[in-house]
Amino acid sequence: MSMNDNRKIVHIDMDAFFASVEQRDNPALQGKAVIVGGNPQSRGVVAACSYEARKYGVRSAMSCAKAVRLCPHAIFTRPRMDRYREISARIMEIFFKYTELVEQLSVDEAFLDLTSNHLGESSATTLAELIRKDIVRETGLTASAGVSCNKFIAKVASDINKPNGITVIPPAKVLDFLATLPIGKFYGVGSATENKMERIGVKTGGDLRRFGLEELTFHFGKQGGYFYNICRGIDPRPVKSSRERKSIGSETTLAEDILDLDLIRQILEEQAESVIASMQSKKMGAHTLSIKIRYHDFTTITRSTTSRTPLLNGRDIGFYIPRLLENTEAGRKKIRLLGVTVSGLFSLNSTPVQLRLPFPESTIHQKSRKQTLL
């Protein structure tokens, strides 16, 4: 393994994501064997299942007919992809609070490069724990994490202490970790490849390391080079950001519910300062400002305003916050979470800035939703 790889890579993987969302949204399903998929009387397959169902041998991609034979008392529920995508988007925004280098692999997992991060924190393990706590606080769901020096090791590590666990593999421990790792646990080794490796005497990463590049290429073709590198802990692939950032935000779940309107304004103004600092550090402006409020009964609302002139500084954002608050029940209904977000981002380096009017012009949009368990 190359020891000059000083990167700090984290792989975050949600625990039984679809099934966990169903259990969270419906308290009657908590602690039960839940299978998300088709009708067990039809030809449907298991999209996901809770850990309670996994104890009976139920797995993703298994036929629902087989799943119900293994776990007759399981509760079947249809997938709700829009709901899963909605919660996934919130989780990805949590990641972007820590780094711009977020590579989303699916709705429930992503790589993060935390070598440089927004908190200036040197410990990727500390950051991974903060991220996992944020996910629980914001969504009520748990995630597992793998922390290491490259994507391959981080991905494998995240599966070691599931559910709701973290595994850290520092560079000095990588070769020892891979030496005893069963070959079937290697990312990219499916059942067919695992069987083929066992036929040539490869059961662990240590066994695989005894083969040279030519031998592995002979047995596995183009994949031979990949196997040669990964059993030595070599994976130079960068974390590639999956999308351009569409918003910058700051939000806080309060230690206790508050009613004091002056305190509410103060918290929003402090969050706005953080958002402005982040926006200015990136040399960006915005067109839309939103505040988010979650009341004590878990009703969550947003109030947004879109300005015809760019939002660039504290004066611009500060002008709108009291006006957005007027369209809420702040001061009359206790609040447990507050947030400020700017969107409609653009680069100040490439976009001409329109001269300001004496008072910014805007329209205010309202959106609310009831989320009983968030």
Image: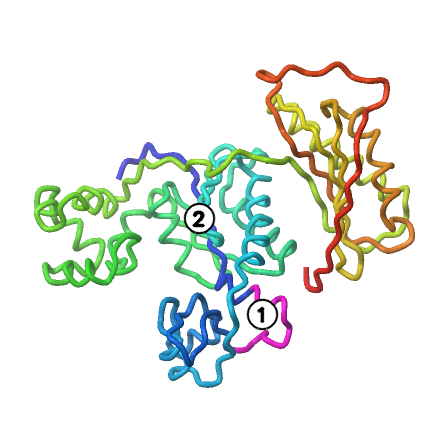
The residue singled out by tag 2 in the image is 11
For this rendering, which residue is in front, 47 or 212? 47
For this rendering, which residue is in front, 191 or 151? 191
* Relative to 203, 246 lies left or right: right
Measured as percent of width and height from the top left, residue 3 is found at 31, 35
Q: Residue at x 80, y 38 (%)?
A: 364
* Residue 28 counted in the magenta span: yes
Q: Which quadrant of the rendered structure holds the C terminus?
A: bottom right
Amino acid beneath label 2: His
Q: Which residues are magenta?
A: 21-32
- State the scheme by which the image is colored: rainbow
Q: Residue at x 85, y 52 (%)?
A: 258
Residue 286 visible in the shown view:
yes
Q: Main secondary structure of the magenta part?
A: helix
Residue 255 visible in the shown view:
no
* Relative to 172, 141 lies left or right: right
The residue singled out by tag 1 in the image is 23
